[in-house]
Image (spheres, helix red, strand yellow):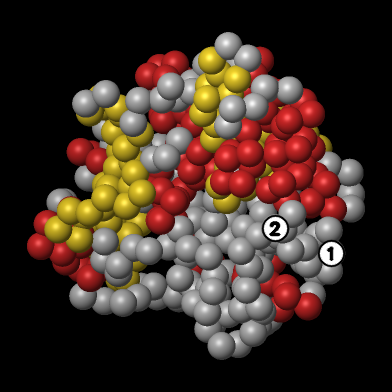
Amino acid sequence: MRPFKFNNASNSAGAISVVSADLTARYLGGGTNLIDLMKEDVMQPSELVDITRLTNFSEIKKVGKGLSIGAMATNADTANDERIRQNYPLLSMAILSGASAQIRNMATNGGNLLQRTRCSYFYDVSMPCNKRKPGSGCSAFQGMNKGHAIFGWSEKCVATHPSDMAIALAALDAVVQVEGPGNAQRSIPFADFHRLPGEQPEMDNNLKHGELITSIYLSADRLAEKSYYLKIRERSSYAFALVSVAAALETNGDSITDVRIALGGVAHKPWRARTAEQWLIGKRPTEANFIAAATAELKNAKPLQHNQYKIGLAGKAISRAMEGAMQGGSYGTMEASNK
């Protein structure tokens, strides 16, 4: 790990001022991803600004008909909050399916959104990686890309986003609240927060340098009773998703009136399955229709050399998650056979 300055922030304005003035300065919350990246020499911030004392950003509170979740609240506190469990069970399910209890006790919500890909080439500083060093090339594009993207990738980068929490937030149409220099406040719809790689894979999201995530807003959720999170991974604990699905729906009689489907492990950002959602509106909530909707979504998938299996896996995962949502229950994990 390289030498760096350390700064304890007593308020958001001071923290933002320090980070905004230095392009290589970074905020430090739980540090569960950033510190690992520094140890591997993937990131070399000149200064860390500790924001753990900004306790006003740790609150989970009712705002209007929705809920505001503080960016500094831990993943564990968020998943176990009674209001989250009752009114946004999909979010609780997703958080509890990720990482370990120890990491969830440390990791913050803001940090979860900002965590970087777990692509092995990104972590290996001896290998070319456009995300780590723009213009150097993408080793995964022609290399071992079994766990990489099937949607939205470019030849510059085929990495996937590692978060479970973010997949649920995508399905819930969350809004990210941020503060910038001069107390400038901004609201970013979750669909616009993360980026596809395009020509700038080094940019994971649409935050401006120095902007600080303060909270995440969730509007009232009508789909809470029928929601389900399914995560498929190579081993049953502490593994990132090969494919994950956040599914929620609302029915009126024998017809689907609203549906949300978001996929993890398949793209550079949480992937909303808009085609599948649109296909299901007005249809009966049957296994056959869930399979047909998944098939329609996956027609646009572009597998790489080693991850063709993800198309079939994602199709079955969407169908199973939708069935789980109809039954209104919990979350599921599946261990995938070695592909």
Q: Which residue is mark 1?
A: 306
Q: Decide which of 57, 253 is in the foreground and name it.
A: 253
In x, y percent, where is residue 21? 21, 75
Residue 333 in sight from this viewpoint? no
Residue 329 in which image quadrant: top right
Lateral position of residue 136 relative to residue 169, left or right: right
Position of residue 214 measured from the top left corner of the image (x, y, whole percent): 26, 47
Crowd around label 2: few <14 · some 14–19 · many ≥20 (10 Å): few
Identify residue type, mark 2: Asn
According to the picture, the residue beneath numbered tag 2 turns out to be 300
Q: Which residue is rendered at x = 68% and y = 72% of the image?
A: 121
Occupied quadrant, residue 293:
top right
Q: Secondary structure at mark 2?
A: loop
Badge 1: few (under 14), some or many (20 or more) residues near its Cα, within 10 Å? some
Mark count: 2
Type of amino acid under label 1 = His
**How far apart are labels 1 and 2 at the CA level?**
17 Å
Point out the residue furthest to the left here. 182
